[in-house]
Image (cartoon, rainbow, N blue to C red):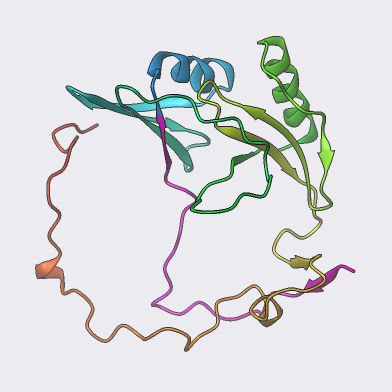
Amino acid sequence: MKQIIETRKTPRSPGDIRYQGVNHLAMATGDMEKTIHFYRDLLGFRLTAAIGEPGYRHYFFSIDGVNGIAFFEWPGVQPLPRKPHGQPVRGPWGFDHVAFGVATEEDLWAVKDRLAAAGFEVSEVIDHGTIHSIYTYDPNHIPLEFSLDVRKNPQRLVVGDPRPTPSVLEGPDPVPGRWPEVTEPTPREKRIVLPGIGSDIRD
């Protein structure tokens, strides 16, 4: 049975952090050329940075100008074993698949048709209630999903779990008081940024 839990209308406080999508997800590949051909040339993501040193590369793609995906290329990296999206696993694990959002139904079908024309295995369109999705794998066997949000109000929390965890029933908004408050913020004069790989390149 589906529940809908409304978002509380709480005013924004000065200490709230403003997030801006996913800066990038960092993946690994053993073949950067195939990876570029898939993400830039087939999917249309823009290649925005190409950092490297002897022994490795780190390349970045922009999905929509805000969200991104990046790849390390290390010698000897092999494609992942192909695991079906969402298939249960046991033992140490931390990643299942990457889902990219699309804006319209036309976009979803365009991605499906483009993948099929390029010879990639791609699922039929699946209705998950809140989203319509297709599934495929990139050249590194990273499982990918492309999803269209079909909710009338994407800000609502929709609960379809018959036994949700207690925190779900508290609603979608952050619960104050669960974590210690910051009492000693880093003063401006101590905000030091150390150089790292790529710090010598600028726009």
Question: What residue sits 47% from the left and 53% below the top?
Answer: 20
Classify 118 as above or below 184. Answer: above
Residue 198 coordinates in the image, percent (x, y)? 19, 35
Question: What residue sits 75% from the left and 75% below the top?
Answer: 6
Residue 190 coordinates in the image, percent (x, y)? 10, 68
Give the number of marks: 0
Residue 77 located left or right of residue 126: left
- Magenta range: 1-28
Image quadrant in which the N terminus is located? bottom right
Q: Work out whether residue 66 or residue 142 is closer to the camera in this orientation and state it.
A: 142
Residue 127 located left or right of residue 97: right
Question: What residue sits 53% from the left and 20% below the top?
Answer: 139
Name the image quarter holding residue 124: top right
Classify 19 as above or below 59. Answer: below
User: Magenta stretch: residue 54 in it?
Assistant: no
Residue 92 coordinates in the image, percent (x, y)? 48, 53
Residue found at the very far left of the displayed protein:
189
Q: Main secondary structure of the magenta part?
A: loop
Name the image quarter holding residue 107: top right
Residue 28 located left or right of residue 83: left
User: Magenta stretch: residue 27 in it?
Assistant: yes
Classify 201 as above or below 35. Answer: below
Name the image quarter holding residue 55: top left
Residue found at the very far right of the displayed protein:
1
Question: What residue sits 30% from the left and 26% below the top?
Answer: 74
Residue 185 coordinates in the image, percent (x, y)? 23, 78
Image quadrant in which the C terminus is located? top left
